[in-house]
Image (cartoon, rainbow, N blue to C red):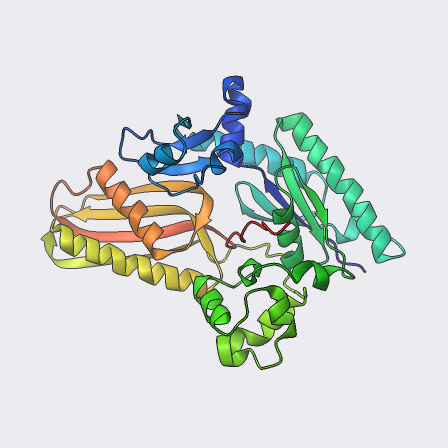
Amino acid sequence: MFRIIFHLDMDAFYASVEQRDDPNLRGQPVIVGSPPTQRGVVCAASYEARKFGVRSALPSSTAARLCPKGIFVRPRMDAYREESHQIMEIIASTGVIVEQMSVDEAYLDMSAICQAETMAAALEKARTLAAALKQRIRTERQLTATIGIASNKLLAKIASDHQKPDGLTVITDEEKVRFLRPLPVRTLYGVGKVTELVLNKAGISTIGDLQDYPGDLRALVGSFGPTLKRFALGEDDRPLELGDEIKSVSGEETFLQDTDDRKILRRCLKEQAADIEKRLKHRHLAAHTVQVKVRYSDFTTLTRQISMEEAIVEANEIYRLACFLLARQKLVHRPLRLLGLGVSNLREPTTQQLALF
């Protein structure tokens, strides 16, 4: 049986919901987040705002400098979750196997309903079904989605990043090696900043360089080497994950003495953020939601969180969002007995935009 995988990704999801619900925002540089006059961060940005370099997790004041005409809209997480539920119901109604990655992203195993005598015919059938699914989402929800189609998850994800927004890209097994060659190594699943730097120092900057590399990649990236070589050739046998074993990554520290010393608290958060980054990268995951937890001397415990449209993995971004939450909610108004930091709503890291195309 031919394997056919879709990767469906809603386009600028949070901002698109806002533009749909308020016609005055359509075509405008919409920035979902706290206004720049307040201490805040960007949760999402429309494509019009992204052209100015605005992205998730930026301080709102920085976003305002980059995009002076940006329109700031406060996030409505309940509205985004409800919209996600409606879209996932549309997808589920097709009867396919679904691995939902986040509120706006899912893998679909279309193999059972796209069978044909040849792989080419199966992919053509898949293209027709993808176009129909995109049209249904547009008609029923007034939103656009981009779909990538291929024989595995790796290629389907890369295909969906290829032509956004409102794209539909098919990567065939015959063209996959050629398609991948000019792309940066960071495009591949499992290649983060550290691995990219190691490969670049070895003269490997594109996936084509990986394909042609004559040596043993284990000398550069350890046990990940053979898998990385397979990914560079477009080979990936990972199944859709229907369970969600890892739902969050977190850490916390109980202090010997209650403290509100900012230096101690900052050092604690930085260490926790670094540990979370290490654990996320080990599992090749990124997070949409950052949460802080505080406990006072009377054992009163509070948690506060913030969600981003684009997933994050770097310690400095996790740390900065944690500091923002503590400051915005004024959680350190008295000494803390415990301070915790965690991330949730996990997914695969987003690949780099395929600018070469």
Measured from the top left, where is residue 316 in percent x and y? 32, 54
- Closest to the observer: 160 or 5? 160
Residue displayed at 86% across by 51% down: 121
Q: Quadrant of the N terminus?
A: bottom right
Lateral position of residue 30 relative to residue 262, left or right: right
Lateral position of residue 257 relative to residue 197, left or right: left
Residue displayed at 52% across by 21% down: 21
Residue displayed at 48% across by 38% down: 50
Residue displayed at 22% across by 40% down: 327
- Point out the residue furthest to the top here: 24
Can I make out residue 115 in this image? no
Can I make out residue 195 in this image? yes
Q: Is residue 325 above or below residue 116?
A: above
Q: Is residue 238 above or below residue 144?
A: below
Rendering quarter of residue 326: top left
Lateral position of residue 343 relative to residue 294, left or right: right
Measured from the top left, where is residue 87 in percent x and y? 61, 35
Lateral position of residue 182 relative to residue 296, left or right: right
- Closest to the observer: 31 or 300? 31
Measured from the top left, where is residue 183 in percent x and y? 61, 58
Q: Is residue 216 above or below residue 288?
A: below
Number of numbered discs: 0
Measured from the top left, where is residue 205 in percent x and y? 54, 65
